[in-house]
Protein backbone atom coordinates (compact mmCIF):
# COMPACT_ATOMS: atom_id res chain seq x y z
CA UNK A 1 0.00 0.00 0.00
CA UNK A 2 2.82 2.35 0.87
CA UNK A 3 4.54 1.86 -2.45
CA UNK A 4 1.26 2.54 -4.29
CA UNK A 5 1.04 6.06 -2.84
CA UNK A 6 4.69 6.68 -3.66
CA UNK A 7 4.17 5.52 -7.22
CA UNK A 8 1.13 7.76 -7.51
CA UNK A 9 3.05 10.73 -6.16
CA UNK A 10 5.94 10.07 -8.55
CA UNK A 11 3.54 9.76 -11.47
CA UNK A 12 1.81 13.03 -10.57
CA UNK A 13 5.13 14.85 -10.28
CA UNK A 14 6.17 13.45 -13.64
CA UNK A 15 2.90 14.54 -15.23
CA UNK A 16 3.25 18.05 -13.84
CA UNK A 17 6.86 18.33 -15.00
CA UNK A 18 6.05 17.04 -18.47
CA UNK A 19 3.00 19.28 -18.84
CA UNK A 20 5.07 22.24 -17.70
CA UNK A 21 7.78 21.41 -20.19
CA UNK A 22 5.38 20.74 -23.05
CA UNK A 23 3.19 23.82 -22.67
CA UNK A 24 5.78 26.21 -21.23
CA UNK A 25 8.51 25.39 -23.71
CA UNK A 26 5.90 25.17 -26.45
CA UNK A 27 4.88 28.78 -25.85
CA UNK A 28 8.47 29.87 -25.50
CA UNK A 29 9.33 28.24 -28.83
CA UNK A 30 7.16 30.82 -30.59
CA UNK A 31 9.78 33.33 -29.51
CA UNK A 32 12.59 31.06 -30.72
CA UNK A 33 10.95 30.60 -34.08
CA UNK A 34 10.36 34.33 -34.53
CA UNK A 35 13.97 35.05 -33.64
CA UNK A 36 15.35 32.43 -36.02
CA UNK A 37 13.08 33.58 -38.83
CA UNK A 38 13.98 37.19 -38.22
CA UNK A 39 17.72 36.62 -38.22
CA UNK A 40 17.54 34.54 -41.38
CA UNK A 41 15.80 37.52 -42.96
CA UNK A 42 18.31 39.89 -41.31
CA UNK A 43 15.84 41.44 -38.87
CA UNK A 44 16.22 41.46 -35.08
CA UNK A 45 12.73 40.06 -34.44
CA UNK A 46 10.80 40.85 -31.25
CA UNK A 47 12.84 43.28 -29.18
CA UNK A 48 10.45 45.32 -27.06
CA UNK A 49 8.94 43.15 -24.30
CA UNK A 50 11.71 42.05 -21.96
CA UNK A 51 15.35 41.43 -22.84
CA UNK A 52 15.45 40.85 -26.62
CA UNK A 53 11.70 40.29 -26.52
CA UNK A 54 12.01 37.33 -24.16
CA UNK A 55 8.59 37.96 -22.60
CA UNK A 56 6.90 38.24 -25.99
CA UNK A 57 5.07 34.86 -25.62
CA UNK A 58 3.47 36.17 -22.41
CA UNK A 59 2.39 39.37 -24.11
CA UNK A 60 1.00 37.35 -27.03
CA UNK A 61 -0.86 35.11 -24.62
CA UNK A 62 -2.46 38.06 -22.85
CA UNK A 63 -3.38 39.57 -26.19
CA UNK A 64 -4.95 36.35 -27.43
CA UNK A 65 -6.89 35.83 -24.19
CA UNK A 66 -8.43 39.30 -24.31
CA UNK A 67 -9.53 38.96 -27.93
CA UNK A 68 -13.11 38.61 -29.03
CA UNK A 69 -14.28 35.03 -29.41
CA UNK A 70 -15.98 34.71 -32.78
CA UNK A 71 -17.99 31.78 -34.03
CA UNK A 72 -19.15 31.26 -37.63
CA UNK A 73 -22.92 31.50 -37.98
CA UNK A 74 -23.72 28.06 -39.40
CA UNK A 75 -20.82 26.23 -37.81
CA UNK A 76 -21.13 23.16 -35.61
CA UNK A 77 -20.33 24.30 -32.10
CA UNK A 78 -19.68 20.85 -30.63
CA UNK A 79 -17.27 19.71 -33.34
CA UNK A 80 -15.68 23.15 -33.41
CA UNK A 81 -14.63 22.81 -29.79
CA UNK A 82 -13.91 19.09 -30.06
CA UNK A 83 -11.31 19.86 -32.73
CA UNK A 84 -9.31 21.97 -30.30
CA UNK A 85 -9.28 19.21 -27.70
CA UNK A 86 -8.43 16.59 -30.30
CA UNK A 87 -5.51 18.70 -31.46
CA UNK A 88 -4.08 19.48 -28.04
CA UNK A 89 -4.53 16.26 -26.08
CA UNK A 90 -2.92 13.61 -28.35
CA UNK A 91 0.02 15.89 -29.17
CA UNK A 92 0.73 16.42 -25.48
CA UNK A 93 0.12 12.74 -24.64
CA UNK A 94 3.00 11.69 -26.88
CA UNK A 95 5.35 13.13 -24.27
CA UNK A 96 4.32 10.31 -21.93
CA UNK A 97 6.52 7.86 -23.83
CA UNK A 98 9.50 10.13 -24.40
CA UNK A 99 12.45 9.00 -22.23
CA UNK A 100 14.33 12.04 -20.97
CA UNK A 101 17.24 10.18 -19.40
CA UNK A 102 18.43 6.99 -17.73
CA UNK A 103 16.96 5.54 -14.54
CA UNK A 104 18.16 7.28 -11.37
CA UNK A 105 17.72 6.82 -7.65
CA UNK A 106 16.25 9.47 -5.37
CA UNK A 107 15.47 8.94 -1.63
CA UNK A 108 15.91 5.24 -2.18
CA UNK A 109 13.32 5.01 -4.95
CA UNK A 110 14.22 4.12 -8.50
CA UNK A 111 12.68 6.63 -10.92
CA UNK A 112 12.60 6.33 -14.68
CA UNK A 113 12.31 9.77 -16.28
CA UNK A 114 9.59 8.55 -18.61
CA UNK A 115 5.93 8.78 -17.69
CA UNK A 116 4.88 5.31 -18.84
CA UNK A 117 7.45 2.88 -20.14
CA UNK A 118 4.93 0.84 -22.14
CA UNK A 119 6.32 -1.90 -24.32
CA UNK A 120 4.53 -0.56 -27.41
CA UNK A 121 5.67 3.04 -26.92
CA UNK A 122 6.38 3.76 -30.57
CA UNK A 123 3.05 2.35 -31.64
CA UNK A 124 1.44 4.76 -29.19
CA UNK A 125 3.40 7.67 -30.66
CA UNK A 126 2.17 7.04 -34.16
CA UNK A 127 -1.34 6.18 -33.08
CA UNK A 128 -1.58 9.51 -31.26
CA UNK A 129 0.15 11.26 -34.16
CA UNK A 130 -2.55 10.05 -36.54
CA UNK A 131 -5.18 11.57 -34.27
CA UNK A 132 -4.07 14.97 -35.56
CA UNK A 133 -5.92 14.27 -38.79
CA UNK A 134 -9.23 14.20 -36.89
CA UNK A 135 -8.53 17.55 -35.29
CA UNK A 136 -7.73 19.15 -38.61
CA UNK A 137 -10.59 17.55 -40.49
CA UNK A 138 -13.09 18.50 -37.77
CA UNK A 139 -11.77 22.03 -37.52
CA UNK A 140 -12.21 22.50 -41.26
CA UNK A 141 -15.63 20.87 -41.34
CA UNK A 142 -17.11 22.54 -38.26
CA UNK A 143 -16.03 26.00 -39.37
CA UNK A 144 -18.42 25.88 -42.33
CA UNK A 145 -16.16 28.01 -44.45
CA UNK A 146 -14.36 27.29 -47.70
CA UNK A 147 -10.74 28.06 -46.85
CA UNK A 148 -10.67 25.90 -43.73
CA UNK A 149 -12.36 23.09 -45.64
CA UNK A 150 -9.80 23.20 -48.46
CA UNK A 151 -7.00 23.38 -45.95
CA UNK A 152 -8.28 20.51 -43.85
CA UNK A 153 -8.73 18.31 -46.90
CA UNK A 154 -5.20 19.07 -48.01
CA UNK A 155 -3.83 18.38 -44.57
CA UNK A 156 -5.78 15.14 -44.33
CA UNK A 157 -4.33 14.03 -47.67
CA UNK A 158 -0.80 14.87 -46.57
CA UNK A 159 -1.21 13.24 -43.16
CA UNK A 160 -2.65 10.01 -44.52
CA UNK A 161 0.22 9.66 -46.99
CA UNK A 162 2.95 10.46 -44.53
CA UNK A 163 1.57 8.40 -41.64
CA UNK A 164 2.19 5.34 -43.79
CA UNK A 165 5.67 6.51 -44.73
CA UNK A 166 6.73 7.46 -41.20
CA UNK A 167 5.56 4.13 -39.81
CA UNK A 168 7.59 2.22 -42.38
CA UNK A 169 10.58 4.52 -41.83
CA UNK A 170 10.81 3.71 -38.12
CA UNK A 171 10.66 -0.02 -38.85
CA UNK A 172 14.40 -0.01 -39.53
CA UNK A 173 15.46 1.09 -36.04
CA UNK A 174 12.80 -1.17 -34.55
CA UNK A 175 14.25 -4.18 -36.36
CA UNK A 176 17.75 -3.26 -35.19
CA UNK A 177 16.62 -2.81 -31.58
CA UNK A 178 14.12 -5.64 -31.53
CA UNK A 179 11.69 -3.71 -29.32
CA UNK A 180 8.93 -1.11 -29.55
CA UNK A 181 9.60 0.47 -26.16
CA UNK A 182 11.27 3.87 -26.52
CA UNK A 183 13.26 3.41 -23.31
CA UNK A 184 14.62 0.05 -24.41
CA UNK A 185 15.48 1.30 -27.90
CA UNK A 186 17.82 3.84 -26.33
CA UNK A 187 19.28 1.21 -24.00
CA UNK A 188 19.89 -1.07 -26.97
CA UNK A 189 21.71 1.66 -28.82
CA UNK A 190 23.98 2.24 -25.83
CA UNK A 191 24.51 -1.50 -25.48
CA UNK A 192 25.34 -1.92 -29.17
CA UNK A 193 27.52 1.22 -29.10
CA UNK A 194 25.79 2.51 -32.18
CA UNK A 195 23.48 5.37 -33.05
CA UNK A 196 21.05 3.95 -35.57
CA UNK A 197 21.54 6.89 -37.93
CA UNK A 198 24.84 5.33 -39.01
CA UNK A 199 22.99 2.28 -40.32
CA UNK A 200 19.68 3.95 -41.20
CA UNK A 201 20.44 7.22 -43.02
CA UNK A 202 17.62 6.62 -45.53
CA UNK A 203 15.16 5.97 -42.74
CA UNK A 204 16.28 9.14 -40.99
CA UNK A 205 15.88 11.34 -44.08
CA UNK A 206 12.46 9.88 -44.79
CA UNK A 207 11.50 10.27 -41.11
CA UNK A 208 12.51 13.95 -41.20
CA UNK A 209 10.45 14.57 -44.33
CA UNK A 210 7.45 12.82 -42.85
CA UNK A 211 7.88 14.72 -39.59
CA UNK A 212 7.92 18.00 -41.52
CA UNK A 213 4.72 16.92 -43.26
CA UNK A 214 3.03 16.02 -39.96
CA UNK A 215 4.03 19.30 -38.38
CA UNK A 216 2.74 21.14 -41.43
CA UNK A 217 6.05 22.84 -41.97
CA UNK A 218 7.72 23.94 -45.16
CA UNK A 219 8.05 22.36 -47.73
CA UNK A 220 4.78 20.61 -46.84
CA UNK A 221 2.76 23.50 -45.45
CA UNK A 222 0.02 23.38 -48.09
CA UNK A 223 -2.64 23.30 -45.40
CA UNK A 224 -1.32 26.50 -43.92
CA UNK A 225 -0.36 28.27 -47.16
CA UNK A 226 -0.78 31.80 -45.85
CA UNK A 227 -0.46 33.16 -49.36
CA UNK A 228 -3.44 31.24 -50.75
CA UNK A 229 -5.49 29.96 -47.83
CA UNK A 230 -4.92 32.67 -45.18
CA UNK A 231 -3.48 30.18 -42.66
CA UNK A 232 -5.80 27.37 -43.51
CA UNK A 233 -8.12 25.63 -41.09
CA UNK A 234 -7.64 28.16 -38.27
CA UNK A 235 -9.41 30.92 -40.23
CA UNK A 236 -12.64 30.75 -38.24
CA UNK A 237 -10.98 30.41 -34.84
CA UNK A 238 -10.40 33.48 -32.70
CA UNK A 239 -8.42 34.42 -29.64
CA UNK A 240 -6.67 31.68 -27.71
CA UNK A 241 -8.44 29.00 -29.76
CA UNK A 242 -6.58 30.33 -32.77
CA UNK A 243 -3.36 30.43 -30.80
CA UNK A 244 -3.64 26.80 -29.76
CA UNK A 245 -3.49 25.29 -33.24
CA UNK A 246 -0.07 26.60 -34.29
CA UNK A 247 1.15 25.99 -30.74
CA UNK A 248 0.18 22.35 -31.00
CA UNK A 249 1.03 21.76 -34.62
CA UNK A 250 4.29 23.63 -34.91
CA UNK A 251 5.77 23.49 -31.45
CA UNK A 252 4.44 20.63 -29.34
CA UNK A 253 4.35 18.20 -32.25
CA UNK A 254 7.67 19.56 -33.41
CA UNK A 255 9.18 18.90 -30.02
CA UNK A 256 7.75 15.39 -29.73
CA UNK A 257 8.77 14.37 -33.23
CA UNK A 258 12.28 15.76 -32.70
CA UNK A 259 12.48 13.90 -29.39
CA UNK A 260 11.30 10.66 -31.00
CA UNK A 261 13.84 11.17 -33.80
CA UNK A 262 16.56 11.62 -31.17
CA UNK A 263 15.40 8.45 -29.43
CA UNK A 264 15.30 6.41 -32.63
CA UNK A 265 18.33 7.66 -34.50
CA UNK A 266 20.60 9.57 -32.11
CA UNK A 267 20.67 7.26 -29.13
CA UNK A 268 18.44 9.24 -26.78
CA UNK A 269 20.46 10.48 -23.84
CA UNK A 270 23.78 8.89 -24.91
CA UNK A 271 26.73 11.19 -25.68
CA UNK A 272 28.55 11.44 -29.01
CA UNK A 273 28.95 8.06 -30.61
CA UNK A 274 31.81 6.53 -32.57
CA UNK A 275 30.14 3.62 -34.35
CA UNK A 276 30.90 0.18 -32.85
CA UNK A 277 33.65 1.64 -30.63
CA UNK A 278 31.96 3.56 -27.86
CA UNK A 279 30.82 6.94 -26.62
CA UNK A 280 32.75 10.16 -26.11
CA UNK A 281 31.29 12.52 -23.52
CA UNK A 282 32.68 16.08 -23.57
CA UNK A 283 30.13 16.97 -20.87
CA UNK A 284 31.45 14.40 -18.33
CA UNK A 285 31.91 17.15 -15.70
CA UNK A 286 28.12 17.44 -15.34
CA UNK A 287 28.12 13.99 -13.73
CA UNK A 288 24.65 12.41 -13.44
CA UNK A 289 23.07 15.43 -15.20
CA UNK A 290 25.00 14.86 -18.41
CA UNK A 291 22.52 12.40 -20.06
CA UNK A 292 19.63 14.83 -19.57
CA UNK A 293 21.67 17.68 -21.01
CA UNK A 294 22.61 15.53 -23.99
CA UNK A 295 18.98 14.66 -24.65
CA UNK A 296 17.91 18.29 -24.45
CA UNK A 297 20.82 19.40 -26.62
CA UNK A 298 20.05 16.88 -29.34
CA UNK A 299 16.34 17.67 -29.34
CA UNK A 300 17.05 21.40 -29.50
CA UNK A 301 19.50 20.94 -32.36
CA UNK A 302 17.00 18.89 -34.32
CA UNK A 303 14.22 21.38 -33.66
CA UNK A 304 16.43 24.27 -34.77
CA UNK A 305 17.29 22.29 -37.90
CA UNK A 306 13.57 22.01 -38.64
CA UNK A 307 13.16 25.76 -38.15
CA UNK A 308 16.14 26.36 -40.43
CA UNK A 309 14.55 24.19 -43.12
CA UNK A 310 11.23 25.96 -42.67
CA UNK A 311 12.68 29.39 -43.31
CA UNK A 312 14.75 28.24 -46.29
CA UNK A 313 12.62 26.10 -48.54
CA UNK A 314 9.70 26.97 -50.81
CA UNK A 315 6.41 25.06 -50.77
CA UNK A 316 5.52 21.91 -52.70
CA UNK A 317 2.22 21.52 -54.50
CA UNK A 318 -0.22 19.03 -52.98
CA UNK A 319 0.15 16.59 -55.88
CA UNK A 320 3.94 16.73 -55.62
CA UNK A 321 3.72 16.02 -51.91
CA UNK A 322 1.56 12.93 -52.22
CA UNK A 323 3.55 11.80 -55.26
CA UNK A 324 6.75 12.03 -53.22
CA UNK A 325 5.17 10.06 -50.41
CA UNK A 326 3.74 7.19 -52.40
CA UNK A 327 6.14 6.93 -55.34
CA UNK A 328 9.53 7.73 -53.83
CA UNK A 329 9.55 7.51 -50.06
CA UNK A 330 7.39 4.44 -49.58
CA UNK A 331 9.46 2.25 -51.98
CA UNK A 332 12.63 3.65 -50.42
CA UNK A 333 11.53 2.72 -46.91
CA UNK A 334 10.39 -0.73 -48.03
CA UNK A 335 13.79 -1.27 -49.63
CA UNK A 336 15.40 -0.07 -46.43
CA UNK A 337 13.34 -2.49 -44.32
CA UNK A 338 14.23 -5.44 -46.53
CA UNK A 339 17.96 -4.67 -46.39
CA UNK A 340 17.81 -4.13 -42.63
CA UNK A 341 15.86 -7.31 -42.04
CA UNK A 342 18.43 -9.31 -44.02
CA UNK A 343 21.49 -7.69 -42.47
CA UNK A 344 20.44 -7.20 -38.85
CA UNK A 345 20.43 -10.90 -37.84
CA UNK A 346 23.79 -11.40 -39.54
CA UNK A 347 25.38 -8.59 -37.56
CA UNK A 348 23.94 -9.18 -34.07
CA UNK A 349 22.41 -12.58 -33.73
CA UNK B 1 12.23 36.21 -80.93
CA UNK B 2 11.23 34.55 -77.70
CA UNK B 3 13.97 32.60 -76.03
CA UNK B 4 12.57 29.90 -73.79
CA UNK B 5 14.66 29.09 -70.76
CA UNK B 6 13.94 25.97 -68.73
CA UNK B 7 15.46 25.14 -65.37
CA UNK B 8 18.33 22.69 -65.67
CA UNK B 9 17.12 19.28 -64.57
CA UNK B 10 18.84 17.93 -61.48
CA UNK B 11 21.36 15.18 -61.86
CA UNK B 12 20.94 11.96 -59.88
CA UNK B 13 23.76 12.89 -57.54
CA UNK B 14 22.03 16.19 -56.79
CA UNK B 15 18.74 14.42 -56.17
CA UNK B 16 20.17 11.87 -53.78
CA UNK B 17 22.18 14.26 -51.65
CA UNK B 18 19.68 17.18 -51.77
CA UNK B 19 22.34 19.46 -53.24
CA UNK B 20 19.85 22.24 -53.98
CA UNK B 21 18.47 22.02 -50.45
CA UNK B 22 21.98 22.26 -49.07
CA UNK B 23 22.73 25.30 -51.19
CA UNK B 24 19.63 27.06 -49.92
CA UNK B 25 20.43 26.11 -46.33
CA UNK B 26 23.93 27.48 -46.74
CA UNK B 27 22.59 30.83 -47.86
CA UNK B 28 20.13 31.13 -44.99
CA UNK B 29 22.73 30.08 -42.44
CA UNK B 30 25.16 32.66 -43.78
CA UNK B 31 22.51 35.35 -43.54
CA UNK B 32 21.38 34.27 -40.06
CA UNK B 33 24.74 35.21 -38.57
CA UNK B 34 25.19 38.48 -40.43
CA UNK B 35 24.39 41.78 -38.82
CA UNK B 36 20.78 42.89 -39.02
CA UNK B 37 20.11 45.81 -41.32
CA UNK B 38 16.86 47.15 -39.89
CA UNK B 39 16.23 50.21 -37.77
CA UNK B 40 14.16 49.85 -34.64
CA UNK B 41 11.58 52.27 -35.89
CA UNK B 42 9.74 54.07 -33.11
CA UNK B 43 12.93 54.14 -31.04
CA UNK B 44 15.46 54.97 -33.72
CA UNK B 45 14.67 56.83 -36.88
CA UNK B 46 16.60 57.34 -40.07
CA UNK B 47 17.06 60.88 -41.32
CA UNK B 48 15.25 61.19 -44.61
CA UNK B 49 17.13 62.75 -47.52
CA UNK B 50 17.02 66.52 -47.75
CA UNK B 51 14.82 66.42 -50.83
CA UNK B 52 12.23 64.16 -49.18
CA UNK B 53 8.64 64.91 -50.16
CA UNK B 54 6.98 65.11 -46.78
CA UNK B 55 4.87 67.72 -45.01
CA UNK B 56 4.77 71.18 -46.53
CA UNK B 57 6.37 74.32 -45.18
CA UNK B 58 6.56 78.02 -45.91
CA UNK B 59 10.09 79.28 -45.99
CA UNK B 60 10.32 82.57 -44.13
CA UNK B 61 12.02 85.79 -45.16
CA UNK B 62 15.57 85.56 -43.87
CA UNK B 63 17.75 87.12 -46.56
CA UNK B 64 18.28 83.96 -48.58
CA UNK B 65 15.41 84.54 -51.00
CA UNK B 66 16.10 83.88 -54.70
CA UNK B 67 17.00 87.30 -56.07
CA UNK B 68 16.03 89.11 -58.22
CA UNK B 69 12.91 86.95 -58.66
CA UNK B 70 11.65 87.56 -55.16
CA UNK B 71 11.98 91.34 -55.41
CA UNK B 72 10.25 91.36 -58.81
CA UNK B 73 7.25 89.44 -57.48
CA UNK B 74 7.09 91.60 -54.37
CA UNK B 75 7.05 94.71 -56.49
CA UNK B 76 4.46 93.35 -58.89
CA UNK B 77 1.97 92.40 -56.20
CA UNK B 78 2.93 95.20 -53.79
CA UNK B 79 3.67 92.79 -50.96
CA UNK B 80 4.58 93.80 -47.42
CA UNK B 81 7.82 91.93 -46.66
CA UNK B 82 8.37 91.22 -43.02
CA UNK B 83 11.43 89.51 -41.61
CA UNK B 84 10.64 86.10 -40.11
CA UNK B 85 7.28 85.81 -41.87
CA UNK B 86 6.20 83.76 -44.89
CA UNK B 87 7.65 84.63 -48.28
CA UNK B 88 4.28 84.00 -49.94
CA UNK B 89 3.27 86.59 -52.53
CA UNK B 90 -0.30 85.24 -53.00
CA UNK B 91 0.14 84.46 -56.70
CA UNK B 92 -2.00 81.27 -56.39
CA UNK B 93 0.28 79.39 -58.75
CA UNK B 94 0.45 76.50 -56.29
CA UNK B 95 -3.31 76.18 -56.38
CA UNK B 96 -3.31 76.19 -60.18
CA UNK B 97 -0.62 73.55 -60.40
CA UNK B 98 -2.36 71.29 -57.90
CA UNK B 99 -4.20 68.21 -59.20
CA UNK B 100 -6.70 68.63 -56.31
CA UNK B 101 -6.99 72.43 -56.18
CA UNK B 102 -9.66 72.49 -53.49
CA UNK B 103 -7.13 71.42 -50.89
CA UNK B 104 -5.68 74.95 -50.99
CA UNK B 105 -7.46 77.80 -49.27
CA UNK B 106 -5.48 80.98 -49.94
CA UNK B 107 -6.45 84.57 -49.16
CA UNK B 108 -4.55 87.82 -49.02
CA UNK B 109 -5.44 91.00 -47.20
CA UNK B 110 -4.76 94.68 -47.74
CA UNK B 111 -2.93 96.51 -44.99
CA UNK B 112 -3.77 100.15 -44.10
CA UNK B 113 -0.60 101.31 -45.84
CA UNK B 114 -1.89 99.92 -49.18
CA UNK B 115 0.48 96.94 -49.27
CA UNK B 116 -0.72 93.38 -49.32
CA UNK B 117 0.12 90.26 -47.33
CA UNK B 118 -1.03 86.63 -47.16
CA UNK B 119 -3.63 86.15 -44.42
CA UNK B 120 -4.99 82.63 -44.92
CA UNK B 121 -3.07 79.68 -46.29
CA UNK B 122 -4.70 76.36 -45.43
CA UNK B 123 -3.69 73.04 -46.94
CA UNK B 124 -5.91 70.03 -46.38
CA UNK B 125 -3.37 67.21 -46.26
CA UNK B 126 -6.10 64.56 -46.41
CA UNK B 127 -6.52 65.36 -50.10
CA UNK B 128 -2.86 65.86 -50.88
CA UNK B 129 -0.97 63.34 -53.02
CA UNK B 130 2.46 64.78 -52.17
CA UNK B 131 3.23 65.15 -55.87
CA UNK B 132 5.18 68.37 -55.36
CA UNK B 133 3.74 70.27 -58.36
CA UNK B 134 2.93 73.24 -56.12
CA UNK B 135 6.53 73.37 -54.96
CA UNK B 136 7.73 73.41 -58.57
CA UNK B 137 5.25 76.15 -59.37
CA UNK B 138 6.22 78.48 -56.52
CA UNK B 139 8.12 81.41 -58.09
CA UNK B 140 9.67 82.72 -54.85
CA UNK B 141 10.89 79.46 -53.31
CA UNK B 142 8.33 79.81 -50.51
CA UNK B 143 6.23 76.64 -50.49
CA UNK B 144 8.49 73.69 -49.83
CA UNK B 145 8.35 70.01 -48.92
CA UNK B 146 10.24 68.97 -45.82
CA UNK B 147 11.49 65.72 -44.31
CA UNK B 148 8.59 65.42 -41.83
CA UNK B 149 6.93 62.14 -42.77
CA UNK B 150 5.00 61.11 -39.64
CA UNK B 151 1.75 62.75 -40.67
CA UNK B 152 -0.80 60.70 -38.76
CA UNK B 153 -3.25 62.61 -36.58
CA UNK B 154 -6.17 61.85 -34.30
CA UNK B 155 -8.72 64.16 -35.94
CA UNK B 156 -9.34 65.41 -39.44
CA UNK B 157 -8.87 68.92 -38.20
CA UNK B 158 -5.27 68.16 -37.28
CA UNK B 159 -4.54 67.22 -40.88
CA UNK B 160 -5.02 70.83 -42.03
CA UNK B 161 -1.84 72.88 -42.24
CA UNK B 162 -2.53 76.53 -41.48
CA UNK B 163 -0.26 79.45 -42.24
CA UNK B 164 1.16 79.45 -38.71
CA UNK B 165 2.02 75.76 -38.82
CA UNK B 166 3.52 76.07 -42.28
CA UNK B 167 5.70 78.97 -41.17
CA UNK B 168 6.73 77.12 -38.05
CA UNK B 169 7.72 74.00 -39.98
CA UNK B 170 9.55 76.19 -42.50
CA UNK B 171 11.48 78.07 -39.80
CA UNK B 172 12.39 74.79 -38.17
CA UNK B 173 13.48 73.23 -41.44
CA UNK B 174 15.57 76.25 -42.41
CA UNK B 175 17.44 76.02 -39.13
CA UNK B 176 17.96 72.26 -39.40
CA UNK B 177 18.71 71.56 -43.02
CA UNK B 178 18.88 74.70 -45.16
CA UNK B 179 22.68 74.68 -45.21
CA UNK B 180 22.96 71.01 -46.01
CA UNK B 181 24.09 70.25 -49.57
CA UNK B 182 21.73 68.24 -51.76
CA UNK B 183 22.87 64.65 -51.73
CA UNK B 184 21.80 61.36 -53.11
CA UNK B 185 21.35 58.54 -50.64
CA UNK B 186 24.52 56.62 -51.34
CA UNK B 187 26.71 59.63 -50.48
CA UNK B 188 24.70 60.48 -47.39
CA UNK B 189 26.69 59.89 -44.25
CA UNK B 190 23.56 59.92 -42.13
CA UNK B 191 22.32 56.88 -43.96
CA UNK B 192 25.55 54.92 -43.89
CA UNK B 193 24.06 52.55 -41.35
CA UNK B 194 21.78 51.22 -44.04
CA UNK B 195 24.18 51.24 -46.91
CA UNK B 196 27.45 50.33 -45.31
CA UNK B 197 27.65 46.95 -46.93
CA UNK B 198 26.26 47.59 -50.34
CA UNK B 199 29.54 48.97 -51.59
CA UNK B 200 27.86 50.67 -54.49
CA UNK B 201 30.22 52.44 -56.82
CA UNK B 202 28.80 55.20 -58.97
CA UNK B 203 29.90 55.06 -62.61
CA UNK B 204 32.22 57.96 -63.30
CA UNK B 205 30.94 60.41 -65.91
CA UNK B 206 33.01 60.25 -69.07
CA UNK B 207 34.97 63.14 -70.49
CA UNK B 208 34.99 65.35 -67.41
Image (cartoon, helix red, strand yellow):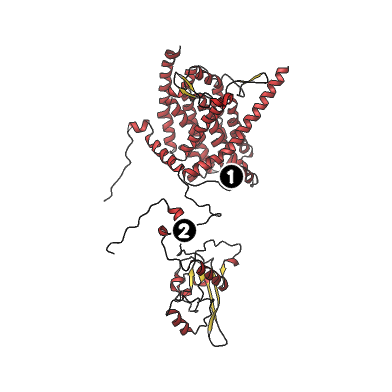
Q: Quarter-wise, where is residue A65 in the image?
A: top right
- Identified at 48% across, 83% down, the residue is B77
Within-10-Å neighbours for mark 1: few <14, some 14–19, many 20+: few
- The numbered disc on residue B62 is none
Is A114 drawn above or below residue A28 in the view shown? above
Give the left or right position of residue A127, taking residue A111 as reference.
Answer: left
Chain letter for the residue marked with disc 1 in the picture? A
Give the left or right position of residue B103, taking residue A316 as reference.
Answer: right
The residue indicated by pointer 1 is: A51
* Front-lying residue, A50 or A6: A50
Q: Is residue A139 visible?
A: no
Q: How many marks?
A: 2
- Residue A72 placed where, x, y %? 60, 45
- Residue A237 placed where, x, y %? 59, 43
The residue indicated by pointer 2 is: B190
The secondary element bearing badge 1 is classed as helix
- Residue B173 placed where, x, y %? 51, 68
Is B179 drawn above or below residue A183 in the view shown? below
Tag 2 near tag 1, CB within 8 Å:
no
Amino acid sequence: MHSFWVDLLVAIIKILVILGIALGIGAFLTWVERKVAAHIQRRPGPMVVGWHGLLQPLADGVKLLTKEDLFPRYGDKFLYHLAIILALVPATLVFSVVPFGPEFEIFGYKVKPILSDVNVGLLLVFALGSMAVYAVALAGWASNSKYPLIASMRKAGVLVSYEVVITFAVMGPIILAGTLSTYEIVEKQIEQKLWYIWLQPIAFVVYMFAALAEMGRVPFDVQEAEAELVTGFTVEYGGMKFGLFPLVEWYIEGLTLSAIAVVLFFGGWSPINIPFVGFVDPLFFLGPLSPFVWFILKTTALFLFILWLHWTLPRYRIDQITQNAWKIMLPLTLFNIVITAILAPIVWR
Amino acid sequence: MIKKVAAKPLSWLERIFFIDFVRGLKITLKNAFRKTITTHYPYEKITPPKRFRGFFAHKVVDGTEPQPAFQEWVNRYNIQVEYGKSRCVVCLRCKRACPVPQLFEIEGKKLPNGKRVVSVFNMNMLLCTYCGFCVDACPVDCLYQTDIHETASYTRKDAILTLEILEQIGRDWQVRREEEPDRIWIDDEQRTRLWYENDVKLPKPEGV
